[in-house]
Image (cartoon, rainbow, N blue to C red):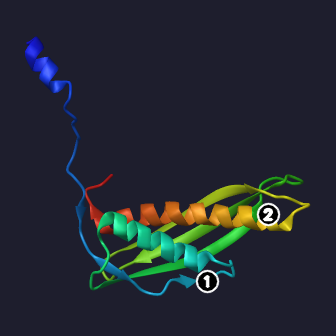
Amino acid sequence: MAAWASTLGGCAYAVGRAPVRSATVHLEPVVVLAPEIGLREELEAAVARELDRLGAGGGAMPLNVAVTSAAVRSVALGAAVQEARLTVSFSTPVAEVSLSGRRAFALSPDDPAATAAARAQAYAALADELVADGLRQLLLVGEP
């Protein structure tokens, strides 16, 4: 019995079935319905990285990505923290996913460039997060 248990010590187990790529796609031009500077480029780069990671790029099926909302709001009255909010829609001819997220960033009242950089960093992190989740839901079957 001890020999059997020791051989299992180095094994790894996964419950459920492995993810299966259900489609390969090519990215259509990203539509951004918000005046956020650099957001289109950030989303395009995030989609390219995620498609490469999933091995789902270069296919014939079009992938449409659209930012339907990008907004900033104050977290609390008088606070030096704001929140970036982003809603992104991903669609192919056979499926559609829409995801939203938010990320706080610090204001620098004495340094507008630092505030702009923090805002851009918040949107970049949101883009990476939403793209990873959206493409996983849209293109993979069997992944939780």
Q: Which mark is residue 115?
A: 2
Could you tell me which residue is drawn at 22 percent across and 61 percent down? 20
Task: Look at the numbered discs 2 and 1 and tell me whether their residues touch, using CB distance below 8 Å.
Answer: no
* Quarter of image, res 28: bottom left
Query: Looking at the image, is mark 2 or mark 1 earlier in the sequence?
Result: 1
The kind of residue tagged 2 is: Thr
Could you tell me which residue is drawn at 51 percent across and 63 percent down? 128
Give residue 72's position: percent from left, percent from top.
73, 67
Q: Which mark is residue 33?
A: 1
* Quarter of image, res 12: top left
Q: Is residue 63 left or right of residue 111?
A: left
The kind of residue tagged 1 is: Leu
Give residue 60's position: percent from left, percent from top.
27, 85
Could you tell me which residue is drawn at 47 percent across and 66 percent down? 131
Q: Secondary structure at mark 1?
A: loop
Q: Residue furthest top?
A: 2
